[in-house]
Amino acid sequence: MFEARLHQSSFLLKILEAIKELLNEATFQCTQNGIQLQAMDTSHVSLISLFLSQGGFDNYKCDRNISLGINLSSMLKIMKCAGSDDILTIKNHEEPDSITFIFESQSYDKVSNYQLRLMNLEHEHLDIPETDYACVMKMPSSEFARIFKMLLQFGETVEISCSKEGVKFSTSGDLGSANIKLAPNNTTDSDKAVFIEIQEPVVATFAIRYLTLFAKATPLALRVRHI
Amino acid sequence: MFEARLHQSSFLLKILEAIKELLNEATFQCTQNGIQLQAMDTSHVSLISLFLSQGGFDNYKCDRNISLGINLSSMLKIMKCAGSDDILTIKNHEEPDSITFIFESQSYDKVSNYQLRLMNLEHEHLDIPETDYACVMKMPSSEFARIFKMLLQFGETVEISCSKEGVKFSTSGDLGSANIKLAPNNTTDSDKAVFIEIQEPVVATFAIRYLTLFAKATPLALRVRHI
Amino acid sequence: MFEARLHQSSFLLKILEAIKELLNEATFQCTQNGIQLQAMDTSHVSLISLFLSQGGFDNYKCDRNISLGINLSSMLKIMKCAGSDDILTIKNHEEPDSITFIFESQSYDKVSNYQLRLMNLEHEHLDIPETDYACVMKMPSSEFARIFKMLLQFGETVEISCSKEGVKFSTSGDLGSANIKLAPNNTTDSDKAVFIEIQEPVVATFAIRYLTLFAKATPLALRVRHI
């Protein structure tokens, strides 16, 4: 028996919006500690690892481990049915092939009940190695999203070079070239803080398309760490 | 000679927006009591009956009955030309084949004058029988619109079952199933009041598409009655 | 060496938005007095003449005349990369085949640097004759834009007739006909002032499509003069 209750159902909606372009379907692994999703994106380029701790729910019960194979665009359709003040309960009781989403309205005496068919997905466990990063950078996620949206107009890959002085994002294409330089600041205003911690300078090249997709998680967190 | 003057021209715009997906063209019957429109939708499934009483206009003159056959999307184009504070006059003087819409601006010394060609439409008078309803329900029109918008994602037909305890809207399809239950409340706040008056329990099935189209009249009224 | 600095970079963005549907590419001629653009639109129907005086920039240096052949949609892409509070510098130093746009953020320690390839465009100088106008009319540019947006629904050409009493815009088509009359007022409120100065009555016919395109300059100026 699995049951999780969440007052702020919009949070789950934002998560789905963030991953829907990377994954079509996914296995949510529910244990007594929380809900975990680990998957490679459809082109097997990037890794998505998500953990929703049981403590983040308003109520959480899971008396045996279960794997829920879910079509994400169907789940997104259901989550969009939630009113902004609805309380969400996700349930899987004795029904092996479906999962139930219940929305309780706080402004009406209204209960909406959506049953979603589960899918049989093959699931390989991914062992994600612990990594020591040569460079850790923190910046506002909105700025992160903005930079790659700009660069996507100019090229397909971005060279990110990071040193003590700052980080430089460079790309070029048919139009010409683009370089964006961002220096660390000592702002205590967390909306604007740019922070760089570095063992040695790093230069690496990435597909801008993927960074743009990762940036879709912007509404979820104020700050992003990378490299 | 027919002439009707309306200070709040946006009201007529909202009516046209509400019926334009049900009807392509319609006959407006003008009498000294007001303007009436009665028609079956283009697929002959639903019935539209609209009456604009002469008392709702700021000025109304109609000295003989006339029938105006109008292409609704053309009339909608004209109504969209009105400024938000324009005063509308609709006129049909001695011109058998056209009708004139005049918008007078209150912020400029500006008069806009649109002549629309009339159409020769066959018109059968519909005798709408008086009906006694086994169940009368009132609910906020925004909630009515919202429910069918949700259900349209899951299926094509909705089963509505109404009892003293409340009303249940159910549908199912490839994704799974959806049930929304709404109970009557005693709220005096008319924005949220749900009211059910019942002789005997009713269960009936409808095409969700039509209920969604009817819900386009939402901006016109705060509450909807049905069954 | 050419260098121009502009605190309010959004101004240049609005100019590009206004001309992008008339021109695909254009030659900007930079002299010590400012930047000039003169061109016929792609169908050789209308004439665009733009002059940005050096005094309008926060800093302006141009020690020899240069012609910059620019693809406008590429330049528009770059201008859209500017943050709302960014300071723009446009530079062309010793690079014959490219121009550099630099945006300095005022909220971050961030410098964005875009290099755009120049194009080799044939450029004929247009001698625009001085004209004495029989009728000069000033009206709010938002009203100008609004009128042609309405008329475009009804026809392809507009007859504009102007006399002491006011100006009349008329068109007709399949739907019927439309006439908009606007009288001069003595409003001192410049947002609403309509002013007509006339030597003799004027009647002229224009393609509405072009007037609609000209009206895209609406965000740039409060008032428009025409005929």
Image (cartoon, coloured by chain):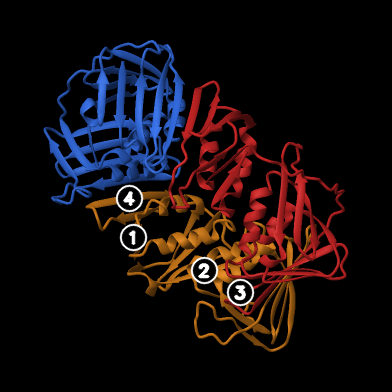
Chain colours: A orange, B blue, C red
Q: Secondary structure at mark 2?
A: strand
Please tell me if label 4 and label 3 are on a single chain: yes
> Three-letter amino acid code at disc 3?
Ile
Q: Which residue is mark 1?
A: A89
Q: Nearer the viewer, mark 4 or mark 3?
A: 4
Q: Nearer the viewer, mark 3 or mark 2?
A: 2
Q: Which mark is residue A50?
A: 2
Q: Residue furthest left?
A: B199
> Three-letter amino acid code at disc 1?
Thr
Q: Secondary structure at mark 4?
A: strand
Q: Chain of mark 2?
A: A
> How many neighbours does mark 3 have within 10 angstroms: few (below 14), some (14-19), or many (20 or more)?
few
Q: Chain of mark 1?
A: A
> How many neighbours does mark 4 have within 10 angstroms: few (below 14), some (14-19), or many (20 or more)?
many
Label 4 to label 3, Cα distance in Å?
A: 36 Å
Q: Chain of mark 3?
A: A
Q: Which mark is residue A113?
A: 4
> Three-letter amino acid code at disc 4?
Asn
